[in-house]
Amino acid sequence: MFIGIDLGTSGVKALLCDDRQAILASATAPLMVSRPGPGMSEQSPGDWWHAVDAALCHLRDERPAEMARVEGIGLSGQMHGAVALDRQRHVLRPAILWNDVRASTECAELEQAVPELRAVTGNRAMPGFTAPKLAWLRRHEPETFAAVAHVLLPKAWVRLCMTGEMIEDMSDASGTLWLDVGARDWSDAMLAATGMTRRQMPALVEGSAKAGRLHRELAETWGIAGQPIVAGGAGDNAAGAVGLGAIVPGRAFVSLGTSGVIFATTDRFRPWPDQAVHAFCHALPGLWHQMSVTLSAAACLAWWSGVTGLAETGLLAEMGTPAGPAPVLFLPYLSGERTPHNDAAIRGAFVNLSHDTSRATLTQAVLEGVAFSLRDGLEALAASGTQLSEADVIGGGSRSQAWMAILADVLGITLHSLADGEYGGAFGAARLARLAVTGEPPESVCTPPRRSTSVTPDPSRTAAYAAQWLRYRALYPALRSG
């Protein structure tokens, strides 16, 4: 038996899986985000622990016999957050989260201070990453910064509570801006640029490696007979990739969730930061991955639903199946954009409205705008040398056949929807736990799920969408200058 725990921003999810990878039970516990100022986003690590404990106690109560036989626990979670600890390993302040943008000034300063930053870390300096947050603390909370003995990412802090060990996996560490991603080791130059040293960093392991054992007292509390191994685990997207079987170079998926992601597994470090492509270590040895990110994907449809007062399902039914591009263009920059622009200030727009524009047309434009943004990301990946011909699609948006058809036509690649199942970070974490316990080859455990349907691009619509995408791209400079 294996447990996967995913520490998200809005809640903790835990899964109990058997030796055949069947999910026997699941539990969730909610979390709240504090916003103490404009652009700020924080959580109390203590709340994470209470949520983890609540989820594991739920699994214990639902499946006591199976919980007693748990051999391994895997961790996944939100990336980039900064948990500052003193010498006694006490939390010094609330954790600054991935979606906190207070450190924009510090990012520019880091880029100037370390000219090789992008080549070493595989990324631009962005305020969501961990290193700029510590630079911000050094400037704005100097007493707190002076007391910092250790810095952990969110799931590594949970591991500390579970095992007493300060250990981080390569995929999550890649999102700190302190890691030499190609070498899979901490970068002394990047640490020094923020006034940090290796002594303040956790030890590094691969996601499928052993990374401590559960405290005996916690095992007893959660109804576990022994002291299970805790695996290195993974950041949320890498864990999701493990759950999807995206562990072979060239395997890719598109996530149509609140944000949009194109994730591609690579056999080597392929940085392409100038177009805001993320290059991170994967959760398994000898693998890396690239990601393009659209900050608002399904969030755009949710926003449009709120504006119109019509449920998303109603909007999609009203729209029907488009025969080609809408006459209206929508730019989905409701909260800025990541790939390829890295522009937190840009905002969205409808363009080419007329007296004849209907609600259904605007709904179509919203879906197409998200697809065009993902096309931007696909082109950025292609420019880096990563060419994709197909991808699985996950997330709420994948349930809309119309959106799947639009996306296939815009991207010009075959897309696959998946049979019902659990493919998120908690499931990937459970797989990593199994690998840490058994030492099995990853390809025998991290198998891809069954595909339910495939959507191939229509050549005539693809040509029409290619022309519309060029019009879409031409609008960004005008919005930015405005």
Image (cartoon, helix red, strand yellow):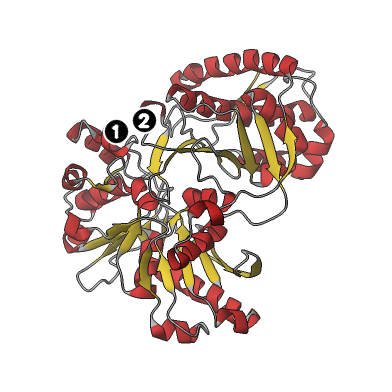
In the rendered image, residue 65, in percent from the top left (x then y), is placed at 61, 84
Q: Compared with residue 317, is residue 33 higher up or lower down, i.e. above or below? A: below
Q: Is residue 327 visible?
A: no
* Residue at the spot 55% in from the left edge and 83% down from the top edge: 68
* Residue at the spot 47% in from the left edge and 25% down from the top edge: 380
* Residue at the spot 69% in from the left edge and 14% down from the top edge: 464
Relative placement, left or right, of 313 versus 383 is: right
Relative placement, left or right, of 432 versus 375 is: left
Question: Which residue was labeled with disc 2?
Answer: 273
The amino acid type, in three-letter code, at marker 2 is: Pro
* Residue at the spot 51% in from the left edge and 29% down from the top edge: 377
- SS at badge 1: helix
Task: Give the label on residue 118, or none.
Answer: 1
Relative placement, left or right, of 79 versus 106 is: right
For the residues bearing labels 1 and 2, Cβ distance under 8 angstroms: yes
In the rendered image, residue 373, in percent from the top left (x then y), is placed at 56, 28
